[in-house]
Image (cartoon, rainbow, N blue to C red):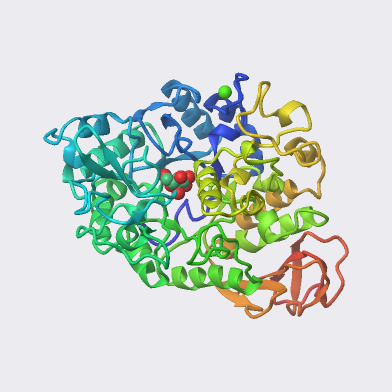
Amino acid sequence: METGPAWWKESIVYQIYPRSFQDSNGDGIGDLQGVISRLDYLRDLGIDVIWICPVYDSPNDDNGYDIRDYHRILDEFGTLEDMDELLGQAAARGIRIVMDLVANHTSDEHAWFVESRSSRDNPKRDWYIWKPPGADGKAPTNWESNFGGSAWEYDEATGEYYFHAFSRKQPDLNWENPEVRQAVYRMMEWWMDRGVAGFRVDAITFIKKNQRFPQLPAEEGRELASLNGGSLNQPGILDFLREMKREVLEPRNAVTVAEAPGVPLSQVPDYLDERDGVFSMLFQFDHVDLDMKPGPKAVYHPWRLTDFKRALAGWQRETEKYGWMALYLENHDHVRSVSKFGDDGEYRTESAQMLAAYYFLMRGTPFIYQGQELGMTNCPMDGIGDYDDIMSLRLYREGLESGRSEEEMLAYLAKRSRDHGRTPMQWSGGKNAGFTAGKPWLRINPNYPEINAERQEREEDSVLWFYKRLIRLRRENRALVYGDFCELYADSEQIGGYVRSLGGEKWTVLCNFTREPVPARMPENGRLALSNVKSRTHGFLAPYEASIFRETGNGDETI
Ligand code: GLC
Ligand code: CA
């Protein structure tokens, strides 16, 4: 892996969830031609890379994360020709494409699995994880799938169970089998040959299973136990990952961002060391899951600003020593950041801008999730019928089965459902927010007449314009890319801040996370480079203010 400066360190990545980005043919589902039609918007925003969520052929049990054919495009999204066109059109605008690599599991409709399940002596039997029933005739272990229920599914035809870390339509590949790994590597090369720059590596920390397949200790009163103890970041996983790096990533110079829950800070060197780690950068979960605690599921835990900041700063300090980080606040698995960490009412614009400044100028490559640049909010849902996400529906059902009320479960989903990040992109105040001429596959947030791209293009103090300014500021100042990170106000429950420094250059980012003015020390000799507040008061940060100062050292115009 490259050390020192690299194009992907200087890049801004934009994540597209194709189903919800832009529909081009009125079937209510976003598609590749829709993405192509919005490339100019993305170029004008200033991004360099698109990470596109799975577009492969899939029965869509988990919206494309259950792949039936790695070499085909989902009919609803278009064709391979459309994909090639997207690659070409993006390249013409200086934009690279990163694909989603889903290789922990396939769909149960993938040809490999169809073969594997056909008989116990099929040559592909060992491509997946099959086990005879446990002694009592039940599942082989008490591991619980990430989406709820047993992680084992009984298959009548051959009288064995297969393992699935996610839904039962997502059987896990058996990475112990070298043929499986080689098949995955060849598939990666096939995509790289088509021109993709690299991969966002889905659920990669689940690929290694504890080969003893032990029973795991369950919480009181429960039989099932989170599969993490047997299938998350298990010893031996690095052998697989190093092989992948050696065989594909390194020779092809692929950029990678690993979805890596379960990796502790102490393992940053294993994963990210630029000399002998495995990935370019990774997504950690500490700051987005700070409302989750061990114990009963679907319970929302309150959190404090210091928890949020500590999560981010910890990764800053650790990655700074070895490599690089992926910076993000939102994606298709999480709620809208302005609703969670900011104020999606009165201070929506200011708080969305403040959050942007806070994470964007840390040390790492910033990822923007579609609609985040508009300050899109969580969506009010009228009942369970408005939800689509497999995980939300399962949690809801389990909650009711265990005696919890409908109201309580809906209140939880209002704060955590993945659907909040998946409602269609709000392009305009016109019909269906400009997303589709037909009936959208998922409810469109009713606030689209107010919150939409067309309007924000016109209004220079919009969230969208603030993102454009941030992108430009980062692009023009190397210290904001490569500079050291030093946290300020670590113990404050109101202010978040840090300094980035490189050579003699020093930048200070100060953010107010509250709706009250808060006294704050401004940097001496600091010159205001960007702020989301028009008239600043000396010695105070206004509600949800974000101000970025550059220390010039020559004392011209102090704040
Ligand atoms: C990742 C994806 C998520 C998916 C899961 C299973 O977490 O981001 O959307 O459900 O993997 O593939
Ligand atoms: Ca469509």
Q: Is residue 513 visible?
A: yes
Relative placement, left or right, of 174 versus 195 is left
Relative placement, left or right, of 454 versus 484 is right
- Image region (quadrant) for ligand 2: top right
Residue 136 point in image, percent of width and height: 22, 53
Give me the residue at 26% from left, 34% from top.
Answer: 113
Q: Quadrant of the C terminus?
A: bottom right
Q: Is residue 503 visible?
A: no
Question: Which residue is more in the foreground, 152 or 389?
Answer: 152
Relative placement, left or right, of 170 versus 141 is right
Give me the residue at 35% from left, 37% from top.
Answer: 192
Q: Quadrant of residue 154?
A: top left
Q: Quadrant of the N terminus?
A: bottom left
Question: Which residue is more in the foreground, 385 or 31?
Answer: 385
Give me the residue at 74% from left, 80% from top.
Answer: 524
Q: Quadrant of residue 412?
A: bottom right
Residue 139 point in image, percent of width and height: 27, 50
